[in-house]
Image (spheres, helix red, strand yellow):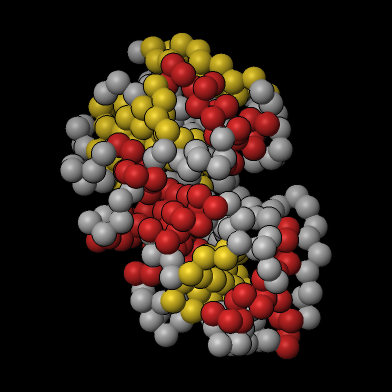
Amino acid sequence: MKAKMAFLHKPHDLRIEEVQLPALKANQVLIQVGACGVCGSDVECYEGLSAEGRYDLGPYTPGHEWGGKIVDTGDSVTTLKAGMKVTGDCVMACGVCANCKDGLMPSACLNMREIGFRPDSPGGMGEYMIVEEQYVHQIPDDWSYADGAWVETFSIGYFGIWGNDGYIDASDIAVIFGCGPVGISSVMVAKTSGAKVIVVDPIASRRKLALKYGADHVIDPTEENLKEQIDKLTDGKGPSVIVEASGNDNAIAAVFDVAGHSCRVNFIGHSIGRKVPVELGWTIWKTLKLKGSGGTKDFGQRTIRFMSAIKDKYDFEALNTHYFDFENLQKAIDTAIHEKDNAFKVMLKFDI
């Protein structure tokens, strides 16, 4: 069976090519893609600004935010059937290496793959994709394929707060740095808990969006002293929870300045590959609790249930600001690069 798929060969070299799909292995499913989101990490790999995309190993098919429909299953697949709407995990732990058997995070897997970032794990920027059963999750029949594509993004914001022994409740004040797709997911998670939510973002359109999706207050960090603004909103105590979802150097440094005593700090914005000067001594004198999360261990199905519980309250569809047919992939990428102020989520759609 032949299919059209995108391949990133090197920076700024993304091509749609027709290829012969390999035969299904016993533990795999064949999925017809219905929608695939363009993530900021896809853009950075395209621009050559991130080492996450492994085109050094060979051309690969991007796309880790996807929703589709199963059209065929391998002989040993037991939980999934043709016709099911599905989505899947991004960070793919093998489950059998020493680190996996120790229960460590997917990022610790000695055989880790990332769907949409490597030649050995093709992503959703193609008409079809083949994925092992263990990484695929059924979504409700009444969800759109674009809803399914949001699961991976939302899982990061959800796990970023709750994963690795994290928590939040109505007694907390949360400050969220960065209100891109992952940040807005964290906003919804924090507000669902009943916490007071403050969002910090320099882009006006994103601050406006944050107010629609649960933020109680928004701050432009370029206007006034950030710590003073946060202190005003927290009666001088500072936040009890911080989510750093921007990966921005200034935001990362500000975390240590604005955090309240015993604040639970969650780092989920990518900054790997560079050193960021911070006043680490505040970790001692404020008794800060710092954690990160590489992948979202065992949160795929939980994320789907969480999203189902809040979908009547929050309009996920409205977050998809731009749709492009798969044939217009290059235009979709260019839009994500050059229209950051108004292109919140660029979504590819497929005939299905």
Could you say where residue 215 lies in the image, as x and y percent from the top left? Answer: 43, 66
Hey, which residue is sitting farthest front in the picture? 223
Image quadrant of residue 130?
top left
Instruction: Tell me: 336 left or right of 227.
Output: left
Q: Is residue 156 above or below residue 198?
A: above
Q: Work out whether residue 236 or residue 270 is closer to the camera in this orientation and state it.
A: 236
In percent of width and height, residue 254 lies at 70, 69
The residue closer to the viewer here, 259 or 211, is 211
Q: Is residue 93 visible?
A: no
Quadrant occupied by the N terminus: top left
Q: Which residue is at 30% across, 51% downward?
A: 315
| The C terminus lies in quadrant | top left
Disc tally is: 0
- Residue 56 can be seen, yes or no: yes
Horizontal relation, residue 171 to residue 106: left or right: left
Residue at 61%, 87% in the rendered image: 236
Q: Residue at x 34, y 24 (%)?
A: 350
Residue 42 position by quadrant:
top right
Q: Please tell me whether residue 19 is drawn above or below residue 231 in the rendered image.
A: above
The residue drawn where x is 67% and y is 76% is 227
* Rendering coords of residue 240 (x, y %): 54, 81
